[in-house]
Image (cartoon, grey):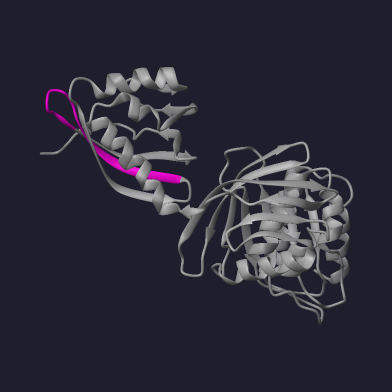
Amino acid sequence: MRDDDLAARLAAIKGDDPSPDFASSLREQLQAELSEESLGDGSITQLMIVDGQRARGEQPVTKRTWISGAVAAAAVLAVVGGLVIANNDDDETGVAATATEVAEVVEADPAQVIELLAAVYNADDIDAVMELFSDESVLTGHPFDPSREGLDEIRQIQIRDRATAATLDPWEILNLDVDGDTVTWDHVWTNDGGQDWCAEDHSATITNGKILIWEFAADPQPCASHSTVLLEYVAAYNGGDIERLMTLFSEETVITGHPFVPRSEGLLPIRGLQIRDMGDGASYVISNIDIAGFTVTWDHVWTDADGVDWCAEGHTATLSNSKILTWDFAPNPQLCAT
């Protein structure tokens, strides 16, 4: 594939909105060709294809595929619906575009600005990150500094932030939501020691493709701390304290796959299910807890009121604000082997 072929395809992307099949086909073709061919004198060491998942609750919001190869094109950034193709190269040959041009494309959709922010942050491209801010931008509540304003100060905090992050894809955004020009999201951020930190409720005001106000999520915590929610559940369950137990759920909570009731949503139905589950002296022991961001998995031994042990593997829960938001009950509990 020659440089002008690549240029033509990228021009097509930035024209009419292509179908999902076209985008998928283009992605596969670029992956195959760019990973195998040397295209001219310029080079791109990393080409990034980002699939944006816009629906709330889909995780992760940003998926990244890295492709190695040599391509005679300068900083190419194009948008195909939720598809972003990006690279950063100082070579002046080929097709040139900047994060500013992408911001102009997506300015009517603030969510894509945040998706692009995550992509260029993970690519360790501070220049591209800063294209998404202006001299009027304000960043508040960051753990490193409570308030930063303007390009110079925000650049300093972004450099420090990225320097303390893991090398490969340290920032994952989740639960992206849009209300007018305001975008909210949660994150899982991995530091340079490999520890995951979870934070909820970032809020950004975006105008004309620029992040004008970013209120950083309050009180980031090690994601491993999510185990405390489960331990609190077990303590309340085994203590027969339904009121304490119900503080771990919300009106938005959904429990699916429970042997007694296939789906319970909201506090009143979940309360009824928990009372029935606790019975008259049942007990609950959990093991094999695993945490990935806001998702927790575990196994259990549940002892019924008659003293019979039932084993189940593969509970999955997502947590939000120290509450259980979704709980997919472990399938097919069985009598424990003796």
**Camera-side residue of 193 and 81:** 193
x%, y% of residue 272? 35, 17
Residue at (28% x, 23% y) in the render:
277
Seen in the picture, residue 296 relative to 130 is either above or below; the reply is: above
Q: The C terminus lies in which quarter of the figure?
A: top left
Determine whether, in the image, residue 90 is placed left or right of residue 224: right
Q: Main secondary structure of the magenta part?
A: strand
Give the magenta part as a residue range. Answer: 295-309
x%, y% of residue 190? 52, 62
Which quadrant of the figure has residue 149?
bottom right
Determine whether, in the image, residue 201 is placed left or right of residue 27: left
Residue at (36% x, 50% y) in the render:
290
Q: As drawn, which residue projects farthest toward the left?
A: 338
Residue at (36% x, 47% y) in the render:
227
Is 300 one of the magenta-colored residues?
yes
Q: The N terminus lies in which quarter of the figure?
A: bottom right
